[in-house]
Image (cartoon, rainbow, N blue to C red):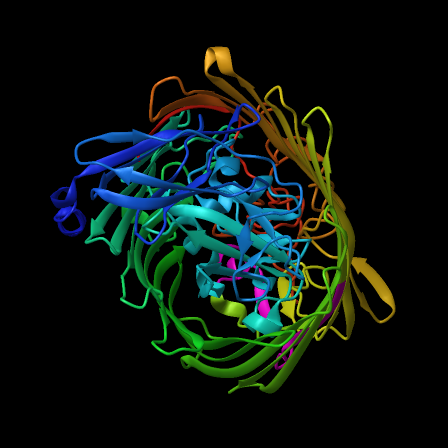
Amino acid sequence: MKNIILLLLIFSFQNFYAQEKGALSGKITSEGISIADADIKILGTNFGTSTDSLGHYTIENIPAGNYKIQMAYVGSKTMRKNITIKKDETLTINAELENDKNSLEEVVISGTLKPVSRLESPVPVEVYKPSYFKKNPTANIFEALQNVNGVRPQLNCNICNTGDIHINGLEGPYTLVLIDGMPIVSGLSTVYGLSGIPNSLLERIEIVKGPASSLYGSEAVGGLINIITKSPSNAPRFSIDGFSNSWGEVNIDAGFKGNIGQNSSVLLGVNYFNYSNPIDNNHDNFTDVTLQHRISVFQKWNLGRKSNKLFSLAGRYFYEDRWGGEMQWEKKYRGGDEVYGESIYTKRYELLGAYELPIEEKMLFSFSYTDHDQNSVYGNTPYMAQQRIGFGQLTWDKKISGHDLLFGTAVRYQFYNDNTPATSTADKTWIPSVFAQDEIKFNDKHSILLGARYDYNSDHGSIFTPRFAYKFKATDNDIIRLNAGTGFRVVNLFTEEHAALTGSREVVLAEELKPEKSYNANINYLKKIYTENGTYIGLETAAWYTYFTNSILPDYDTDPNKIIYKNLDGHAVTTGVSTNIDIVFQNGLKFILGATYMDVSKTENDIKTRQILTEKFSGTWAISYRIPKLFLDIDYTGNVYGPMRLPLLGELDPRKEYSPTWSIQNIQFTYNKIKDVEIYMGIKNLLNWTPNKGNPFIIARANDPFDKNVQYGPQGNVLPTPDNPYALTFDPSYVYGPNQGIRSFFGVRYTLK
């Protein structure tokens, strides 16, 4: 692996210094305040960058000549200027960007599958930049999403710490995760795919809440998360970000860029994470946090063409070795019944690309392929699984009179196989699709979006999903959006059902499962306020209602020894309201606040039941303050979650049926006086909250993980005994939050523009 990385570095940089000519540098401000993440581009070339936390930027190795530069930032008027670059000289261009109360330059693609201003999109799309996630640095994007309102990373296992992403209370399988618009994270690999994306490559994250199946097909029932990676043309020449904490975790992100000629470039990102310090603070003889050793390598090419049409290729390799279990576990115990451990080896390959056809019409061919191999043991239960997903899509973007049309066709191939009895033969599924949408703009105030998709699933037949969106722009600072649509999900239960593998519950498939379908309506209101003293206030409120038929939910209640799966003989509903508020003062103080209230339930036989592991309310915040004289940024971030119903093992189980209201809070100090360097430190989980507080234990029967001393009745029920007074079996699925306590951290970032 080291040799492969070295060769990639050598190849990426072999042409880098051959064109060293001149340079451009400067500082970007707005109303006297330094702007971070402002975009600077030299139009017509491959050169570009973004400003650091103090508003500085540098672009080097620019061939001498005359150019036009563009400087842009969200909420500011774009500035363009003619410049002349001279050999062996650095041209300094400082810019003061003017607030633009009538536009929002940020461009999104997730809502409509085409680039559009976020303000003009009929579909509400939330956008999060790297600067937001830097307020609470994490080792992966999965953890970083904990500070996004309405989005919750959910741990599903106390031992191996696998998990998924919940949006508005819906479980991970209802969330589609994409990289650069390609659906390459799915089922078996949700947590692994999100854990291995180098943060150094992150351009932004776009989040759409609510069904998006009319554009993206299965899995986009609850919403989607689109991870947009940096374009090689805009990435810094070199960047590295490394931190460690008092628990012994070490994370390093590195990014490298090389220019191949004037129009082509390559970007290489590497992420390395290591945690090898077993800790047992709750004294149950099990690791509190999973031990991990992970490396991910990502390379992205932008290939120049004479027509200036897009041609982009990217690939990623991911490897991880993780384990959790009894403190005395070693590799030699893997798969045996002497010492309990959960050990997972994961290898993953990804390839994705986009090619704009060399014709006059605007047609784009996109593709992706993933190969995921998992070698796992849960105690003495092996789980060997392979998943391969191929995806190809052709879209035609066409404007005719007042109609902004998009036509597309896609095909998806899914291969899945494992060693469980539920998969006697490999599951191979073909899903060809056609879709169309039409955005009709009646005038500056009113527009609608109509869309429909037809999928044919080789296992389930035809599936039709329409959508409708209406946007009313009351003023330049007041926008109302109404969206309605349907979604569907084809279920493969055994992609990674950890409750079936890590505990003693038996998984029961009560019937042949039919695809789930959802019907959704949501309304969104966006308000921008600019005060006379320069304060900016952004308010966004949304309300939603989603109705599910054929819903498939794990039944933990009917029999404590089983997990029963079947199509719900009734319906499920999620409804709620959420609000995001951004406040930016001229004195350097910023507030980003979010709150969500929701009701997630199922109704069967006229009995309404609150769904398991869903909170009634949640909140997030990020409060930042800059002290320019000290070159110091202070960030206070956190979240709070209301009670959730938890999976108990029976009436005698002494653990709480509902979790308490709980909160994770963090503080960070960033010193940025040194050019191109940021030094940061802080404390995570200030309140030292862990789920075991208030409970006699978290993992059931941690003293007997192989159930050797459990006694059963004639009907298979567990009997209470002096050794087992609560009639429990070993089960680590009682988990609703991270089990890692308070810890300090220290890190350094270096960016060479």
Q: Position of residue 668 (x, y in %)?
A: 51, 23
Q: Vertical placement of 401 versus 497: above or below?
A: below
Task: Tell me, yes or no, if residue 658 can be seen here.
Answer: no
Residue 686 shows in the view = yes
Among all residues in the image, which is located at the extreme top?
Answer: 629
Chain part drawn in magenta: 496-521
Q: Position of residue 200 (x, y in %)?
A: 37, 42
Q: Residue at x 70, y 51 (%)?
A: 614
618 and 732: which is toward the camera: 618
From the viewer's side, name the closer residue of 22 and 348: 22
Residue 503 falls within the magenta-colored stretch: yes
Q: Position of residue 16 (x, y in %)?
A: 16, 45
The residue lying toward the viewer, choosing from 440 and 746, is: 440
The C terminus, quarter of image: top left
Q: Residue shown at 66%/41% (left/top)?
A: 101
Residue 116: % across, % down: 56, 59
> Is 157 drawn above or below residue 281 in the view shown?
below
Classify 662 as above or below 727: above
